[in-house]
Amino acid sequence: MTGKVVKMAMVTTKCLVLFLCCSLSHVNSWQQDQQLPIVKNNETSSGKLNSNGGYSYKTLYYDQQIDHFGFTNGQTFKQRILVADQFWNRNGGPIFFYTGNEGDIDWFCNNTGFMWDIAPEFNAMLVFAEHRYYGESLPFGQDTYKNVSLLNYLTSEQALADFAENIRYLKTTIPGAENSAVVAFGGSYGGMLAAWLRIKYPNVIIGALASSAPIWQFTDLTPCNAFYDVTSKTWLDASTTCVENVHRSYNVLATIAESAGGFEFIQKAFGLCTPLASKYDLETFMDFLVEMYTDLAMVNYPYPASFLADLPAWPIKVACSYLSDPLDGKPLLAALGKVTNLYYNFTGNTNCVNWTDDGSADASLGTKGWDYQSCTEMVMPMCSNNTNMFYNIPWDFQEVSDKCFEKYKVRPRENWVALEYWAKQLKETSNIIFSNGLYDPWSSGGVMESISDTVVAIQIPYGAHHLDLRGSNPLDTRAVISARIQEKNIIRNWLKITYING
Amino acid sequence: MTGKVVKMAMVTTKCLVLFLCCSLSHVNSWQQDQQLPIVKNNETSSGKLNSNGGYSYKTLYYDQQIDHFGFTNGQTFKQRILVADQFWNRNGGPIFFYTGNEGDIDWFCNNTGFMWDIAPEFNAMLVFAEHRYYGESLPFGQDTYKNVSLLNYLTSEQALADFAENIRYLKTTIPGAENSAVVAFGGSYGGMLAAWLRIKYPNVIIGALASSAPIWQFTDLTPCNAFYDVTSKTWLDASTTCVENVHRSYNVLATIAESAGGFEFIQKAFGLCTPLASKYDLETFMDFLVEMYTDLAMVNYPYPASFLADLPAWPIKVACSYLSDPLDGKPLLAALGKVTNLYYNFTGNTNCVNWTDDGSADASLGTKGWDYQSCTEMVMPMCSNNTNMFYNIPWDFQEVSDKCFEKYKVRPRENWVALEYWAKQLKETSNIIFSNGLYDPWSSGGVMESISDTVVAIQIPYGAHHLDLRGSNPLDTRAVISARIQEKNIIRNWLKITYING
């Protein structure tokens, strides 16, 4: 398709944002739903315990260096850290430290049930450290996102140094903590950070559980088509006919869009808030659908959940139930309209589907942050070659680079992350668990095979995006239950060895 | 002594500068003496071979990122790299990579004879990479040192990233180099960088020889008195009476300085260019002597050498020959004058001893660079408690910090280096040799005992500052010959294992 290249580069960026940030739109509502008010204590590095029926934790604010790697700017900012010590045994109980992703840390804190589930049996303190430039941890306060030059300190290296400083601080100031071994936990980008923290700062943590961490989703480390191939595979697992229908739909959309009354039909079939009005709109809408298909693969959980959207159990199975027969023409689009309604309006509270924005008005901060990161370090090549359920999506680094320069006056460095974080030379590190759900598109860039006795891969069949980090559920699969048992055993072993070696 | 605190903090800084930078004053003359013109090729990343009787190498200029850890400043600068490939076997010969210290890289290249000595038997390519902000590798050209804000990118982390980029570049662009294992070499601060490169980037080097690298000369890692204690021990090894004389001399100096004609006597006895004129001058002069004693320990080589100064073999033995009898009063100062003349005028070409400046007019660039580094990351506590051959030298971090702020508007971060480079948790890394001469004051902050089977300490009795990295000499001690054999064997073993594992 002519003129597709530019659009597709955008898809990739949007897709990443969605992967890591679109959940932000749910943060506020989630807090309200669950009635878990966050205690905000403005005193630096001190806090109060609050309990309200759900998870309880203190909120601390740590005076963090804005720039760890230069000294001219000696300013600090308030980094938010959540601490739950109600399960902790001061006599040697470990610290489980969540390396915050791109978003409000309270959201990750409340969505990482696995840590809360296992804290009592490990007598562990839980700590959730917010990633700089997200949530409340804004280096320049309300001005942080007003000037692109202020984004200069938004890098993974700075975030890792924040976490290392956090751990040193906790261990030297909390009575009893000096003897506590620290284990890092993280999912998605947070999982990448957990693994990288172990790689770059093994002096502060004894090991890391990196769940759904696509640390190899970078140039020369993973073929760019891998991500969409895994997505297709996940859908194929539900139904071949379903995937064939989706694959056929792009031409159908184009044909109908060109026909008289086509745009109106599409608006009605998909329940769109605003109609398509041009070929460009059609391409944007098709990107929007591609995102939805990948998102559904990410959240293809075995029970009803509200991770990226409110959805029933095994949502792809439900989606494919509308596409179980070979369809074409308008009936095909009508069926896809049902899939769209499933994803965007399962609760029935949505009046229409907004296909033109990033999914949330209040997500601008997190979206901007990750968008900047994917224009600097986190440039993850993705492409599709018109097989399975997607159309031809090329990858053009130069074009991405030019777009980034236009937006932020920065250019991504294509090979930097691989160099900085050891590419595939992970036999040089130790004590990392890389867990990946086989349904998760991001497993494409994950560590899927064990690298050594201590750098271990755990594959979770039928598992979606960091399913293992979620709280236990009666509908959990055997596979994720087994993965969690393995993870606990490995962590227990790290702790034992640490105690033996002092 | 009242008012000593301020001065002593200065001593420490000066001492570090001397350790790492004062040699700069010799760079030009050395080049002239040895007639080894450096080929300067202005084309980026290409060069010509030049041979002129001594070591031959090409000079390359690599377009290096000014800021690896931020993207707002996308500028690059020309980093100088010296390459000697005349011994290299393109079919698997290794690359020996010197991680440049704070100074002109050609000087380190020409003073690291060990690499040149062993290159033929290893069929190795030699590479010497210049440290940013030194020599010709100035990020902002002639403006680099004109504005303190331009010094912001002068950190060890940026330098390590430079080296990692260099290695990636060499391996991906030189035909045959993609299969070459890389071993890092470095002495003194360069040794710290070699070890840290292995710690932070084990993906680019298979191991590091870190000679005389005081990586633990930091807060909470080594007692602040260790440095001067080792210095005293080195002198004690020559003569107890000598050390007692030196220890006695400070009070003698103070008494004579206060007496009529005392300043004149001191000027004459020590051959000073300018006389002392105040109590402050006396303190400055005593600091100057302390530096000289530590420098003599650093360069206490078994043969005549010109490392920090032109000196005979075992210069401390020679110095102590003037102090072999218990002395006091003016005869003691006259004997110390002979020691000073030995250090500053062994060749007889110096008219008088300049005790007021840093030792060299042309060393400003290197001196400034290191002075800035010791005001940011490289803050190494040193003190003495009036035992052995020194007076009471307190350590006051706050005072150092205030001085630094006054000079550069930056403050050192006392615990940063320990956190960033794993403090004593070196069991988490592998394949590092830490060699230290027992005569070298800097061995106080070195790794003196092996940490694991692969992080190995080699002690060199009677060895001064990175003696093992110097070229072989007929007067070499058995100890250093043995150390070099061990080093070669260990490196050979790394290379074998690498080849076996692919």
Image: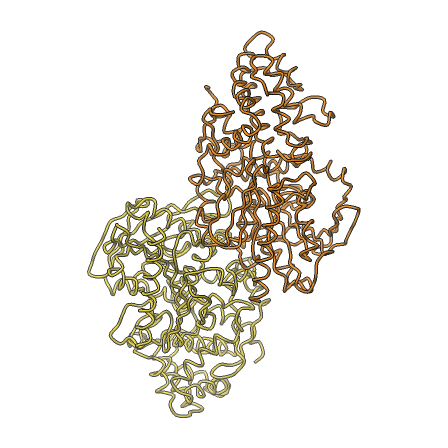
Chain colours: A orange, B yellow
Q: Which of B163 and A262 is in front in this view?
A: A262
The outermost residue toward the top is A260
Which quadrant is home to the C terminus of chain A? bottom right
Q: Does residue B407 lie above or below A459 as drawn?
A: below
Q: In this rendering, would B275 be left or right of B87?
A: right
Q: Does residue A460 lie above or below A323 as drawn?
A: below
Q: Nearer the viewer, residue B46 or A243?
A: A243
Indicate the quadrant where residue B410 lies: bottom right
Q: In this rendering, would B377 be left or right of B360?
A: right
The outermost residue toward the left is B53
Indicate the quadrant where residue A366 lies: top right
Q: Which residue is drawn at 53% across and 82% down?
A: B386
Q: Which of B190 and B241 is in front in this view?
A: B190
Q: In this rendering, would A474 be left or right of B152?
A: right
Q: Position of residue A257 (x, y in %)?
A: 56, 13
Is residue A116 something that shows in the picture?
A: yes
Q: Where is residue A219 in the image (x, y as percent from the top left)?
A: 44, 39
Q: Position of residue B495 (x, y in %)?
A: 33, 57
